[in-house]
Amino acid sequence: MRGRAALPEIFAAIFAALPSVGHAQSDPVVVFRQAIDARNHGDIVAMMALFADDAVREDGSCQPPCVGLAAVRASFQKNIDEHFQANVTSAEGSGDTVTARAEISSDAFRARGIEKRMTSYTVKLRDGKIISWTSPLPPRNPAKTN
């Protein structure tokens, strides 16, 4: 009978020693890379599962900013429809913020004669969910002067 009495303690010790599954989900760089991968694979459902209801996106697809999950979802769905692809070249986390660089391409870029271009991201999380996704627009060519 003593063996059975010790079972709860043994199970508790085993589960305490296992790596936390939730930890990987709350690592900002992991969450960012999961979002990029989901968009690259056209999986809007998986991508939106990583965003908070009050998320804000501000980049070339959202000017003015897209505010709220429905608006953010619609903007990312448009990216998916345009075969948007991002190849992350670097990503660093500091607290709940990710800064990253990526080479991006899409049908919309190709239609303007741009095969690929570099961009940067700043993504902020709260409680393991993305609340802010920003990527600055590239600078416009300065006007030519005579």
Image (cartoon, grey):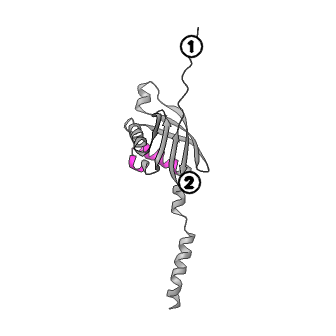
- For the question of whether residue 77 can be seen, the reply is yes
Q: Quadrant of the C terminus?
A: top right
User: Within the image, what quadrant is residue 41 found in?
Assistant: top left
Task: Name the residue located 40 percent from the left edge and 31 percent from the top edge.
Answer: 107
Residue 81, x across and y down, in percent: 37, 37
In-front residue for pair 101/143: 143
Look at the numbered disc 2 and give the secondary structure of its residue: loop
**Whether label 1 touches label 2, CB < 8 Å:** no
Residue 12, x across and y down, in percent: 54, 76
Q: Which residue is mark 1?
A: 144
Residue 39 painted magenta: yes
**Crowdedness of circle 2 by 10 Å Cα count: few (<14), some, many (20+)?**
some
- Amino acid type assigned to the residue bearing label 2 in the image: Asp
- Amino acid type assigned to the residue bearing label 1 in the image: Lys
Task: Name the residue located 54 percent from the left edge and 59 percent from the top edge.
Answer: 23
Task: Name the residue located 42 percent from the left edge and 48 percent from the top edge.
Answer: 48
Q: Residue furthest right?
A: 94
In-front residue for pair 78/43: 78
User: In terms of sequence position, does the residue under pointer 1 or pointer 2 come before the other?
Assistant: 2
Magenta span covers which residues?
Answer: 31-46
Residue 28 left/right relative to 70:
right
In terms of secondary structure, what is the magenta stretch mainly?
A: helix
In-front residue for pair 39/65: 65
Residue 115 painted magenta: no
Q: Which residue is mark 2?
A: 27
Residue 38, x across and y down, in percent: 43, 47
Q: Is residue 109 above or below residue 7?
A: above
In-front residue for pair 60/63: 63
Q: Is residue 130 above or below residue 80?
A: below
**Crowdedness of circle 1 by 10 Å Cα count: few (<14), some, many (20+)?**
few
Task: Name the residue located 48 percent from the left edge and 45 percent from the top edge.
Answer: 55
Real-space Cα separation, disc 1 to disc 2, in angstroms: 46 Å
